[in-house]
Image: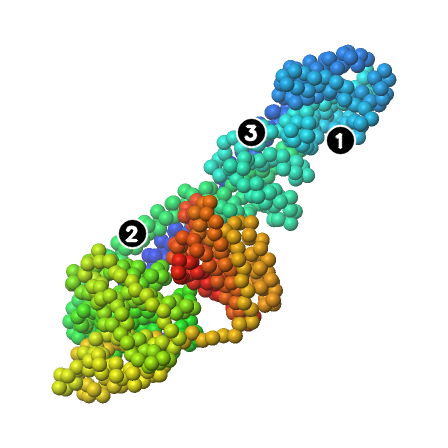
Amino acid sequence: MKIQWNKIRQAAREHSSIIIIITAAILLELITYFQYSYTHDLLEKEESMRAESELAMKAILVKGMLRTTEKILNIQTIEMASMLDNPDALMNNVSSLIERNPHVLGGGMAFKPDHFPQKGRFFEPYAKHVNGKIEVKQVAGDHHDYTRRDFYTRTMERDSAFWTNPYRDDEWNDSLITSYAIPIHDNKGESIGVYFLDISLEWLGDTINYRHMYPSTYCLMLTEEGQLIAGPSQNFTSEKNVEKIVEMINNKSVPRLKSYSGHSDFIRFYDEQKDCEGTIYTAFMRGKPHWKMVVVCYDDEVFADLAKMRRFMFFLMLTALGILAYIVLRFNFFQKRLNKANIEQERISGELNIASGIQMSMLPHSSDDDDEVWNRPDLKIHGTLLPAKEVGGDIYDYLVRNDKLFFCIGDVSGKGVPSALVMATTHTLFRSASVHYNDPAHIMQALNKVSCHNNSANMFVTLFVGVLDLPSGRLRYCNAGHDVPFLLSPSHNKEVMELPVVANLPIGLFSDMVYEQQEMVLEKDTTLFLYTDGLTEARNQSREMYGIDRAKATLLQHIDQMPEALVQTLADDVHRFTEDAEPSDDLTMLAIRYTQPEEKEILDETLHLRNELSEVPRLNEFVKSVTTRLKMENGLAKQIQLALEEAVVNIIDYAYPIGTDGHIDVCARSNGHRLKITISDSGVAFDPTEAGKVDTSLSAEDRPIGGLGIFLVSQIMDSVNYERVDGCNILTLRKKYE
């Protein structure tokens, strides 16, 4: 047990600096976490209190407007008490009321049937504003039985004042209206009728949405039954968004929580349009009408200051850790400096061995069975790098993206560790550029620009970059001073040709260098053989070079071999030629065979569309027919339909100038397990796969417009491939299915 404690203490002393830094980082993170949680709770509480305050304030404002109407009618009822036996005087009373209150749409009285026999069974004098004048008439009759109307029956039954639920009336241009009714009592106190006023609620939406606690906050008002009365304008938020909020409020199964004060309820929700979470606060107005006030708030505004504070605290924490790390590591540096001299040589040797292993691990290997490159029936590829020293300056790489093979081979000037570092950097840059660009010239430009930056050692790289479109065999390539590749055509005359290339200058020399791109179409079973000068300049004991002619002869002799065997054959031949001579340069070879296998198709359908959005239903019917014939699962079929609709609508919107007629061809093919859809148009050239990636972590306000359509398509389909062929845009989508 004592020995174990000694080992622990020794390990602690050896790694004391790391322990101190980790401990400090944990403490700082805990402090930041508790501070963040506490502040978050405070902001939630403040949001709840402010929301309740706004609910109460807006309720008071609305109630004030309604109470004005109630007072007007109550006062008028007292004035007309002496006229209850004079129906003509009652009509004048209604007219006078409406004339004195221009904000009231109309109003009237409705008496019990046969109360005034001289006026008929029904008597309902009604006054309203018409073209700046007051129009009064008796509106009741067989065609208008007010005794069946809600304002009359409810008021008479309860013998008390009553606010009707809002309704829309054609007579007032489909305006939203509510009516306030009170009973009319005779001298004996019995209810003989109803006095009522009609008021418009069009002002309500602007009133409750005048000024808010946060910019995106808005208010709604609902009836007790959940009917929407008023809300914000459509310029502020969409009607669909409001409908979703109302649906959640009326859905009893949606969880509801009590606010901090307990005076209101709130519901948490997610707004897909804003890509943000929010809170819905609800509370009923006191008294009548018993309407519900609603306030909607969004987290990105409530916690905006907290997010800024969190970033600032994170920056301070990193700064503090950096200063602490500098102090601790600086102290340990002087302590360890005395021991470094004795182990320096051993360390360098070990690092070179590790660097060699890392360098080799960076290169692609055919043992990666799960890699997309090795599972393709249309491609065979193999490469090898044989360094002259522990680490080399040659590079080769390849990857498949969207049915395109991106590949390169290069040779860094110089030898040893500096060349190996440049090789690693170039490899990383190629991988990064191949994700964003489809054209070899663009990839070369990007590599050259970075290679020229801070190139104080004046090192350069000869490089060949190619992009092979696997469905069509179209090869685009760009050469930067590298050795000319060979083309092997075994299916025809069995000849070895040099690929026609424009030399260009190597990368790393001039940042403003413009690289020329070339292209050709590879025939089936053609092999492209690329190499570095370590092949042709390999020397034997007599200082004789292996040479291009010898390489061509060997390739021609073994032209039918697959890439792996072909590369091994060349490597063995060079080894026999040089015998035991020490290699003077790295030897790198890369062989690519384009096989393009033919597959039996069980479906081949084409749809011709006009460049109009009205053609989308035809597209959907076409996709439904194809997926049905292929017996696809319903969920997958809908996803494919969505992807096709996004792609075609994108073409309709952007392929042709406004006012220009165009066409779009959609071709669907299947071999029984993979669906291939080709969309072609003759519009302006545009590669959607080179559009900027969409950052879905950003809020709707911060995210740039565009890019979501092709992002959605790429998420649904297995591959998305674009080519510009003979003036046409060709977009190919593929999807495996059961």
> Which mark, residue 15?
none
Q: Secondary structure at mark 1?
A: helix
Label 2 CA crowd tier, 10 Å (few <14, some 14–19, many 20+): few
Q: The C terminus appears in which quarter of the rendering?
A: bottom right
Q: In front here: 467 or 116?
A: 467
Q: Of label 3 and label 2, which has the lower sequence position?
A: 3
Q: Name the residue beneath numbered marker 1.
A: 150
Question: In this image, 250 relative to 349: left or right?
Answer: right
Q: Amino acid at mark 3?
A: Thr
User: Can you see residue 78?
Assistant: no
Question: In this image, 91 relative to 663: left or right?
Answer: right
**CA–CA distance between discs 3 and 2?**
50 Å
Q: Amino acid at mark 1?
A: Asp
Q: Name the residue beneath numbered marker 2.
A: 319
Q: In front here: 91 or 474?
A: 474
Residue 489, position as x, y percentages in the image? 34, 78
Q: Tell me the residue at 25%/83% (across/down).
A: 553
Q: Single out the mark in the foreground, 3 or 2.
A: 3
**CA–CA distance between discs 1 and 3?**
27 Å
